[in-house]
Image (cartoon, grey):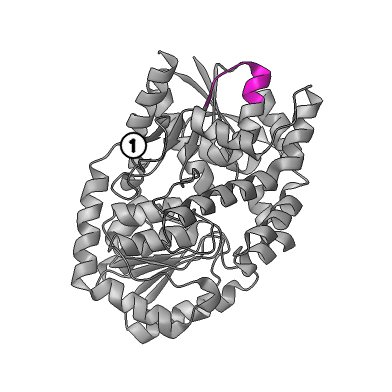
Amino acid sequence: MRITIFGAGSQGDIQPCIRLGKGLQQTGLDVLLAAPQNFAGLAQGAELRFHPLRGDVQQIMAGEAGQKYMQSGGGNPIQSILAMRKMLGPVALQMAEDALEACRQADMLVTLAVFAPFGKTIAEICGIPLVLVEPTPVLPTGDFPAPGWPIQKNLGRWHNRLSGFAMLEVIWQWYQPFVNEFRQRFGLRAVRSADLYRTLISTPLLGAYSPAVIRHPDDWPGNVHLTGYWFDEAQTDWRPSPDLQAFLDKGEPPVYIGFGSMAGRDPRHFAAIVLEALAHSGRRGILATGWGGLNALDVPGKVFALKEAPHGWLFPRMSAVVHHGGAGTTAEGLRAGKPSVIVPFIVDQLFWGKRVQALGAGPEPLPAKRLTAASLAEAIDRAASNPALRERAEALGSILRAEDGVQTAVAIIRQHQGV
């Protein structure tokens, strides 16, 4: 059986696709990853066949429109429609064409739920079944406000469900002109946002997160399966550089601070806040410069500037972790059993910050637009020293480490296809 997995976005979006692909491949299935060309190295490292898609989303986000979007915080869903269309316009149809080509010989398509309109169209053209995966919930529910909705407070079930449908409309409007132009090329009828909802409630949908973090809402249909997080166990075998190992060995566990690509147009500004906050807290720190998210030319002796290291290896060695609240990074912090300080920038990051706070595994999130050295220092001190936060984070980490989300997802897909 041949399965194509279609993914696009940041590395955090592609990693779940790769981990699922490895799990499927280990059961003897033939897996092809269709993703932007800049992720070819990740696919090769996972020994997955790779089909490149035109359009480098990392490059797009590093451009003027992407940086402006991140700097604005993406807090206005209506403005996000215009921003996303501007960023996606040059590449959306190219990606769809390339993903279609990757499915020509496939027996099944697996794609991220936010790309369901494209996935449904490609599955129709090729006459193959579709499976959706989601690192962050997309279906409306009365249990909590929708990720990406500006008001992340539980104002009641009606508000929560309405926010879910509103955010589905926003997601649909991101892609609407490109999806229907793509469908028109193949003689398919135009679709609307209602079709997106029908696809989500009628297609196998795998939630790549733990029911210990988000309970399966009673108002979600039976096609939604919460599998547990999809982790890469190979990360725990990673070997650090001598300099990194020496830094870890010579003092108390440091605080990790990294914002991925989220620092907007002024990464030095955020680096300065981070360094001042660490100085105020008196704690050692690891500053993850990563994909341009932080930029610091000089760091004091109590801080180690780190370009890259697997979170699965690094986070268990920290006293606390400070990050932007991406779904994957949040999962790694929770699994490590370390308190998390979330500094949300855009889209679903505030949702995950509020979720961590509600779980008792971290303090209140600190929105990036209002971040100060004083507020960050206070949050770091609380996360690293508060016994209740530490105990709850450790207990939750034990639960997550006992789950095997990838194998659960693989079993569901195989059962669905009768293989």
In depth, the one of 367 and 287 nearer the eye is 367
317 w.r.t. 110: above or below: below
Q: Residue at x 34, y 57 (%)?
A: 333
Span highlighted in magenta in the image? 122-130
34 w.r.t. 322: above or below: above
Q: Which residue is mark 1?
A: 405
Q: Residue at x 38, y 25 (%)?
A: 412
In depth, the one of 8 and 41 nearer the eye is 8
Asked if residue 244 shows in the view, the reply is: yes
Counting from the top left corner in percent of width and height, residue 248 is at 30, 66
User: Relative to 128, is 395 on the left or the right?
Assistant: left
Image quarter for residue 79? bottom right
Q: Amino acid at mark 1?
A: Gly
Q: Residue at x 49, y 71 (%)?
A: 367
Image quarter for residue 130? top right
Q: Residue at x 63, y 33 (%)?
A: 195
